[in-house]
Amino acid sequence: MKVYLSGKLVDKKEAKISVFDHGLLYGDGVFEGIRVYDGNIFLLERHVDRLYASAQAICMKIPMSHSALTKAVVKTCKANRMKNGYIRLVVTRGVGTLGLNPYLCKKPEVIIIVSAIQLYPEELYKKGLSIITVGTMRNHPEAINPRIKSLNYLNNVMAKIEAIHGGVLECIMLNPLGYVAEASGDNVFIVKGKRIITPPTWCGALEGITREVVMELAPELGYDVKEDVLTRYDLYTADEVFLTGTAAEIIGVVNIDRRMIGKGKPGTVTQKIADRFSAFSKEAGTPIM
Ligand code: PMP
């Protein structure tokens, strides 16, 4: 496997970074997770745009242009003969001192890793997920804004720990006002009649690219999509609940805090959206060759 590091493609075992990199010392950096479907990089442009927006928000200048970075991603996929898989694009603050000051870091480090990913076993897409809501709140927007896809994922990791300790694989995090924000690594949607609702980003949700695609595709299927504030009550009494994310794609939720959702299996709307998403994922890619 070849990894892109410091402007070069190197073997996986040579792909090492300094212990003084602030990505390691402080979680100071940004990242993206991107899928490759049938040799096409899914919505690469949108992911690169979000990466630059995250970097801008943390005063970090990515040391290459948008198009050079896009080319580097394609080149890394090509070198690994990538057909189907996952790309992890990471930009760390780079090597600095043991102090916090990011302006003492020499240069951000761009890393591109390609690999396989499988978040959930296949059967869970048929049976649906059981999840819980957790006590770990999503970051306040004026702490680390959840719209920044930063390397500081401790907030999400703490929530994931609670989920695992609670005997489930995923959880819903609420924001400091008690409203639904998102899952530890996915966005959340509810279905109520013909309406599909997801929390607005100000409630503490990442502007997920899968979320965005679902919001674009759902009206074509005859559903009305809107962003609205949700409470746990809305989740418990929804007809259907599903999660969206690059790795998970679209997965139905059938139980939350021991309340059965809908009929206790992934609903028809979730299935239709998942099928449409799957078709779209084959149409909207940047070819690697
Ligand atoms: N929320 C969080 C916290 C995430 O980490 C992710 C990505 N795994 C998502 C939502 C989904 O975003 P996307 O659809 O862009 O992968």
Image: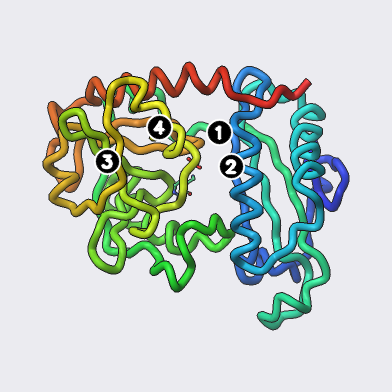
Q: Is 246 displayed left or right of 88 in the figure?
A: left
Q: Which residue is at 76% across, 32% downward?
A: 74
Dot 4, how many residues are within 10 Å of its Cα: few (below 14), some (14-19), or many (20+)? Answer: many
Three-letter amino acid code of the residue under disc 1: Ile
* Residue 24 location (% of width, % of height): 66, 65
Marks 3 and 2, Cα distance to the nearest angstrom? 24 Å
Q: Which residue is mark 2?
A: 33
- What quarter of the picture does the N terminus occupy? top right
- Residues at circles 2 and 1 in contact by the CB criterion of under 8 Å: yes
Regarding mark 1 in the picture, which secondary structure is present there? loop
Instruction: Give the quarter of the image for residue 252.
Output: top left
Q: Which residue is mark 1?
A: 117
Instruction: Say above or below: 196 vs 160.
Output: above
Q: Which residue is mark 4?
A: 214
Instruction: Give the quarter of the image for residue 267.
Output: top left
Three-letter amino acid code of the residue under disc 3: Ile
* Residue 82 location (% of width, % of height): 71, 25
- What quarter of the picture does the C terminus occupy? top right
* Residue 195 location (% of width, % of height): 22, 33
Q: Earlier in the sequence, mark 4 or mark 2?
A: 2
Regarding mark 3 in the picture, which secondary structure is present there? strand
- Residues at circles 4 and 3 in contact by the CB criterion of under 8 Å: no
Marks 1 and 4, Cα distance to the nearest angstrom? 21 Å
Q: Which residue is at 20% across, 28% downward?
A: 194
Instruction: Say above or below: 181 vs 190.
Output: below
Which of labels 3 and 2 is toward the front?
A: 3
Marks 4 and 3, Cα distance to the nearest angstrom? 11 Å
